[in-house]
Structure formats: structure tokens, C-alpha cells
Image: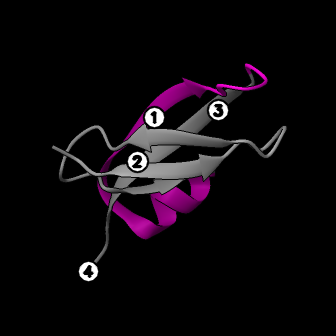
Amino acid sequence: MTRERTISCPDCGESNKVRAPDDVHDTVSLDEKLAKAKGEGTIIKKIYECEDCIYTISLYWYKPKI
């Protein structure tokens, strides 16, 4: 099981808990271009909804380059 992480909503700043989609893609970015530059292999886009303001948050999970 992947560990739980806390991210801040870009809209309201509220903390939200998220989990990686798997054990390989364990690094996250709000920026797809950054994820592609720093990651290797497949980038997984997951969409979350802020628990406070209902803002849609797109996160890009990736395996970091070594």
C-alpha cells in the first residue's frame, strides 16, 4: 500500500490527503511538464477534488529519474 501524502489546494490552500496510484509512481507534481522532465516512463494523471472548496486538482505521478 502506498503512503498517504498531504497536498495543499492551489485555490483555497486547504490540506488534502492523497495516495500514489502504485509503488512505482511515488513522486507527484502539479505541473505536467515538470513531471515529464523529472520522471521516466509513464506519467499517471489523477484528478482529485478539494475537500473544502471542491476545486479540481490534477496531479501527475511519476517515477523519478535516477
Magenta stretch: includes residue 47: yes
Sequence-first tag of 4 and 2: 2
Secondary structure beneath label 1: strand
Where residue 26 appears, as percent x and y from the top left, is 31, 56
Residue 40 included in the magenta stretch of the image: yes
Q: Quadrant of the C terminus?
A: bottom left
> Circle 1 sits on which residue?
45
Residue 35 in the image, given as x and y percentages of width and height = 49, 57
Q: Amino acid at mark 2?
A: Trp
Q: Circle 2 sits in a helix, a strand or a loop, which is it?
A: strand
Q: Which numbered dot is residue 66?
A: 4
As rendered, which of 20 and 14 lies closer to the eye? Answer: 14
Point 83% across, 38% down: residue: 11
- Give the magenta range: 31-54
Residue 16, by quadrant, is: top right
Reading the chain from its start, which is encountered first: label 1 or label 3?
1
Q: Position of residue 60 (x, y in %)?
A: 48, 44
Amino acid type at mark 1: Lys
Question: Which callout, 4 or 2, points to the residue nearer the camera?
Answer: 2
Query: Between marks 1 and 3, how big is the CA–CA gap?
Result: 10 Å
